[in-house]
Amino acid sequence: MDEIDSILNAPLSNDPNALRAEIQKARQAETKAKTQIYTLRGKKGLQAMAAAMGEELPPQLAETPIYDDPEDSPQIQELRRQIALIREMERQQHEQIAELRRKKAELESGSN
């Protein structure tokens, strides 16, 4: 989660290339968060299968709380919240890149 927090708390740059790099980092963090969601869902499925077969759960699965709906998991809710924040930050960065392009075009047309 520290990676996502650092992305969200970074000041926006006026350099389009720096903004693109931040967008790329945000997309990677989003992919990582989605992977964690799928992992949590997979653990839920494994727990259900073991319970249905009457088998003992491995310790790493037994320690994880079982939710009837994996979407109720606090981890998944937090990851979804962070994904939404990352997408909003990306939208703002795209707007800032567009604004920088407009300003550059105005400067270039004014100097010609």
Image: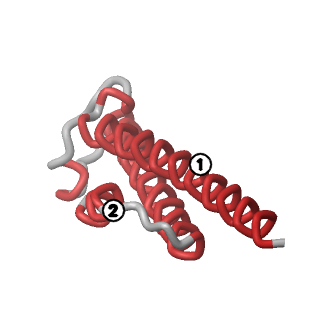
Q: Where is residue 65 in the image (x, y as percent from the top left)?
A: 19, 38
27 vs 16, nearest the viewer: 16
Q: Position of residue 64 (x, y in %)?
A: 20, 45
Q: Name the residue under label 2.
A: 11
Question: Which corner quadrant holds the C terminus?
Answer: bottom right
Pointers 2 and 1 in contact (C-beta within 8 Å): no
| Residue 46 in sight | no
Position above or below: 39 against 111: above
Q: In which quarter of the image is residue 106?
A: bottom right
Which residue corresponds to the image point at 25% horizontal and 51% vertical from the top-left?
A: 61
56 vs 96, nearest the viewer: 96
Distance in Å between CA atoms under marks 2 and 1: 15 Å
| Residue 63 in sight | yes
Q: Name the residue under label 1.
A: 95
3 vs 49, nearest the viewer: 3
Neighbourhood count class around disc 1 (C-alpha, 10 Å): few under 14, some 14–19, many 20 upward: few
Q: What element carries label 1?
A: helix
Q: Where is residue 85 in the image (x, y as percent from the top left)?
A: 39, 43
Q: In which quarter of the image is residue 11?
A: bottom left
Which residue corresponds to the image point at 41% horizontal and 61% vertical from the top-left?
A: 12
Q: Label 1 amino acid?
A: Glu
Farthest top residue?
68
Neighbourhood count class around disc 2 (C-alpha, 10 Å): few under 14, some 14–19, many 20 upward: few
Q: Label 2 amino acid?
A: Pro
Position above or below: 74 against 63: above
